[in-house]
């Protein structure tokens, strides 16, 4: 809808006729004041304004319209009997969609300008619409993300309680079985126990992630013997996976100021991944490189490996290599937690890998902790 504003009825008639002939819908106003009243009520795609009018002239009308937020994007085309000083039409009308044409107007040029402005107005509107939809979409996603984090937090807390009581009952059963000497039940209890431990690890990963998300992951920094921690972690893994050969090279004889349990968690995570993702190989290498300024641990397996394109995403939350995700169970949060732990100690994580050959996961810690 185009609004035409002119104080002379004959001009309105001829302009309306011309525009309607070219398929535009038109409304008219015979003074600046009437034009303003109309603009308050309705959004127009273009306003064609006569400059010389008694009362408010075209420029005054335009200035008022452009101050009014609902109409400030509406293009304005001035009609003037004399050549308009360019300063006039550029001053104050920053929206840019302002132009003029001199009377008597050339119909082809007028039509061209009307069409261009009309298209501009439509496109601006479409863009605004898209922007609105995108904003809504972003808000929705943020809301969902928040709900998901809350859910993970509640679910992991709720799961912890029954898990603790199951652990207690298993210990009771173990004691009873030992007392009664019922050997045949022992392997089953061991199996239940190991599955419960796995479940416990999953739940604590979930808890870690929800604490990380809400900035509540606490670090308990104090100097510890890195070498002892490393040996401890390797011994633990050896007990759980006795058929694997873990070869340790080098040593990390330093007192490291950090969160021992968290860093051990990273080592254990690297080691369990190395075992999990190399089902046909038994050897795992653990290399320790100690420099003056930093300490690096590398865990190498000779398993399925990861293609180059995917390596960058491995440390992202919930990322799992799709091709192998059916074969190996997991949530895709272990490495994400590892990265957070190492970064909070001022260090970096990384991977070197070749598909079907194996992987080396490493982390490097500065010897002066920054946390
Ligand atoms: P999860 O093992 O629970 O899926 P992680 O965060 O520990 O989660 O690992 C993310 C993904 O990285 C895994 O799903 C797997 O695809 C890949 N990955 C991790 N470690 C290895 C490894 N040693 N060899 C091959 N792929 C690995």
Image: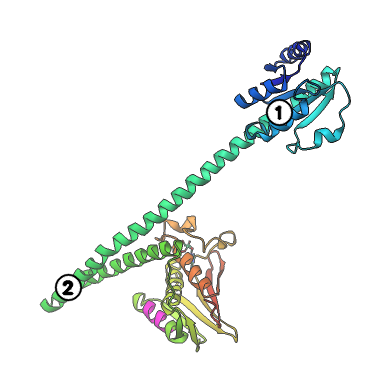
Q: 282 or 169, which is in the foreground?
A: 169
Q: Residues within 10 Å of mark 1 (few under 14, many from 20)?
A: some
Return the residue nearer the eye: 152 or 284.
152
Q: Which mark is residue 119?
A: 1
Magenta region, main secondary structure = helix
Magenta segment range?
231-238
Along the horizontal axis of the image, is 252 left or right of 156?
right
Tag of residue 174:
none
Q: Is residue 334 magenta?
A: no
Image location (x, y in percent) of residue 144: 44, 48
Under circle 2, the secondary element is helix
Q: Residue 287's spot in the image, x, y percent?
A: 52, 81
Q: Residues within 10 Å of mark 2 (few under 14, many from 20)?
A: few
Residue 166 to residue 145: above or below? below
Q: Residue at x 67, y 17 (%)?
A: 27
In this view, the residue in front, 18 or 38, is: 38
Q: Which residue is mark 2?
A: 172
Q: Earlier in the sequence, mark 1 or mark 2?
A: 1
User: Residue 6 lies in what quarter of the image?
Assistant: top right
Q: In the image, is residue 206 above or below residue 124?
A: below
């Amino acid at each position: 809808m185009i609004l035409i504003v002119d104080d002379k009825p004959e001009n309105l008639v001829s302009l309306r006729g011309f525009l309607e002939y070219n398929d535009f819908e038109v409304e008219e106003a015979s003074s600046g004041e009437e034009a303003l009243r109309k603009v308050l009520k309705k959004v127009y795609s273009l306003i064609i304004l006569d400059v010389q009018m008694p009362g408010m002239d075209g420029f005054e009308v335009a200035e008022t319209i452009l101050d009014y937020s609902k109409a400030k994007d509406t293009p304005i085309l001035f009609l003037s009997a004399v050549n308009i000083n360019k300063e006039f039409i550029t001053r104050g009308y920053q929206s840019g969609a302002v132009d003029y044409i001199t009377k008597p107007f050339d119909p082809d040029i007028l039509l061209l300008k009307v069409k261009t402005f009309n298209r501009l107005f439509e496109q601006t509107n479409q863009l605004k619409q898209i922007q609105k939809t995108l904003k809504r979409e972003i808000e929705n996603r943020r809301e969902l993300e928040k709900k998901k984090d809350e859910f993970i937090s509640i679910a992991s807390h709720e799961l912890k309680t029954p898990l603790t009581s199951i652990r207690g009952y298993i210990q009771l059963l173990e004691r009873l079985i030992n007392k009664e000497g019922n050997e045949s039940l022992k392997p089953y209890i061991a199996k239940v126990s190991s599955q419960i431990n796995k479940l416990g690890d999953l739940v604590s990963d979930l808890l870690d992630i929800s604490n990380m998300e809400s900035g509540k992951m606490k670090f308990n920094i104090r100097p510890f013997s890195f070498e002892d921690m490393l040996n401890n972690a390797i011994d633990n893994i050896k007990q759980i996976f006795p058929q694997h050969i873990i070869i340790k090279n080098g040593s990390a004889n330093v007192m490291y100021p950090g969160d021992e349990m968290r860093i051990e968690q990273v080592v254990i995570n690297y080691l369990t991944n190395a075992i999990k993702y190399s089902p046909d190989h038994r050897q795992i290498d653990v290399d320790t490189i100690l420099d003056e300024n930093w300490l690096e641990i590398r865990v190498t397996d000779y398993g399925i490996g990861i293609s180059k394109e995917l390596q960058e995403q491995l440390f992202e939350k919930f990322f799992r290599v799709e091709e192998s995700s059916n074969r190996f169970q997991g949530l895709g949060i272990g490495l994400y937690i590892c990265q957070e732990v190492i970064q909070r100690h001022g260090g970096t994580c990384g991977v070197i890998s070749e598909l079907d050959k194996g992987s080396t996961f490493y982390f490097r810690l500065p010897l002066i902790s920054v946390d």
